[in-house]
Image (spheres, rainbow, N blue to C red):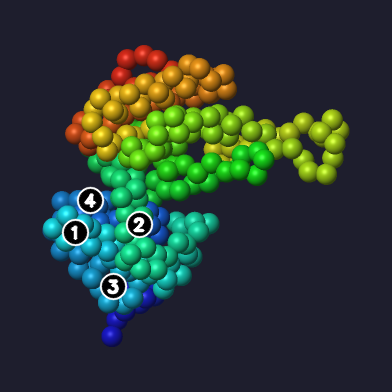
Amino acid sequence: MTTAFDTVSAARKPSPVEPLPHQILAVLGQHRMATTSQMHELLRPGAARQTVSAPLNKLRRDGLVDYAVLPQSNRSRAWYLTGDGARLTKDFPALRGRPPYPISSATAASLKTPHTLTVLRSHLAFVTDARRRGDEHGHLDWTPEVAHPLNDGERIIADAVMHYTLVACSERTKLRAFVEVDRTTMGSERLASKLIEYARLWSYEPQLIGRPRSRQPAAPGPVWLRWYPVFPRVLFVLTGASRYVLDNRISDLKAMVAEHLLVGTLARQVPMGAAVLEDLEEHGPASGVWVPLAGGEPRPWTEL
């Protein structure tokens, strides 16, 4: 009897295209959780729904994935890796270095579902737009829950880091962004304070340990240079409230830029913007729906 382990791990000949079960496991390893329809849109848009649901069900029978039923959703399923699935995927090339976080039960999954699936909704808006435009942005070009160190032993955890390649004629322009997805579950001031954390990351240069500060050689540069050639854009995606409330939260983000010295300095060097998720889904991220946090008229995220 052929199992998912055979399908995923025992291919005899290299192929430039991973088999669909492998892609499904990689999506769940990368994004932690996804609904059937989200994986369908990510991996096989335009194909019959059964194209994705059939291998999902087989992976479940093999004990590699499981699901939680979403409330008030006509029994829609949110899929996640089991312990066996997480162990299998940790050595996938695309997931090396990505800590596995197997979800132990449907109850545990339900606690993570709202935010995780909303972050993935944001990713899908960019994926759909990239396909339409002929740009490069696929299912593994969006990494949720990325941590970076700050001084004093603290960390900043971005909801996602996005990699996106603009394609125009023969030119390819690589863009990166830290993405914060706000479901209006925290206070507006706490949301705006996330900008201070990004400003601290931008300015943080680690000191050598064990020497008096005055005798230390010049630091090699900001810590973020370990991962990025330029500091990524900072994008806020908001949802979960009325337009009036969301507009006020965007205004508070702009106020933080205007009032905080370090954040204002960051904003003069790094593009930063905010948009409403429903606008991204309706019009596409490349439309003029992004409010520049440093001031100005709404524009595409690539022109912030």
Q: Residue at x 39, y 46 (%)?
A: 142
Side (left or right) of 283 relative to 168 = left
Does the CB distance between marks 1 and 4 fall below 8 Å? no
Is residue 70 visible in the rendered image? The answer is: yes
State how far apart marks 3 and 4 are (Cα): 20 Å
> What element does badge 1 sit on?
loop
The amino acid marked with disc number 3 is: Arg
Above or below residue 49? Residue 264 is above
Q: Nearer the viewer, residue 211 or 23?
A: 211
Dot placed on the residue nearer the N-terminal end, 3 or 1: 3
At label 1, the amino acid type is Ser
Which mark's residue is nearer the viewer, 2 or 3?
Answer: 2
Q: Are marks 2 and 3 in contact (CB under 8 Å)?
A: no
| C-alpha separation, residue under disc 2 versus residue under disc 3 | 21 Å
Mark 2 sits on what residue? 111
Check contact, mark 3 vs mark 4: CB within 8 A. no
Q: Which residue is mark 3?
A: 60
Can the viewer see residue 301?
no
Q: Check disc 2 and report its element: helix, strand or loop.
A: helix
Q: Residues within 10 Å of mark 1 (few under 14, many from 20)?
A: some
Q: CA distance from mark 3 to mark 1?
A: 16 Å
Camera-nearest residue between 149 and 141: 149
Instruction: Say which quadrant the N terminus sits in.
Output: bottom left
Given contact means CB atoms under 8 Å apart, are the residues at marks 1 and 2 in contact?
no
Give percent across and percent down for residue 189. 44, 29
Instruction: Identify which amino acid the numbered label 4 is placed on.
Output: Glu
> Residue placed farthest to the top in the image?
296
Q: Position of residue 245 (x, y in %)?
A: 28, 28
The residue that label 4 is drawn on is 41
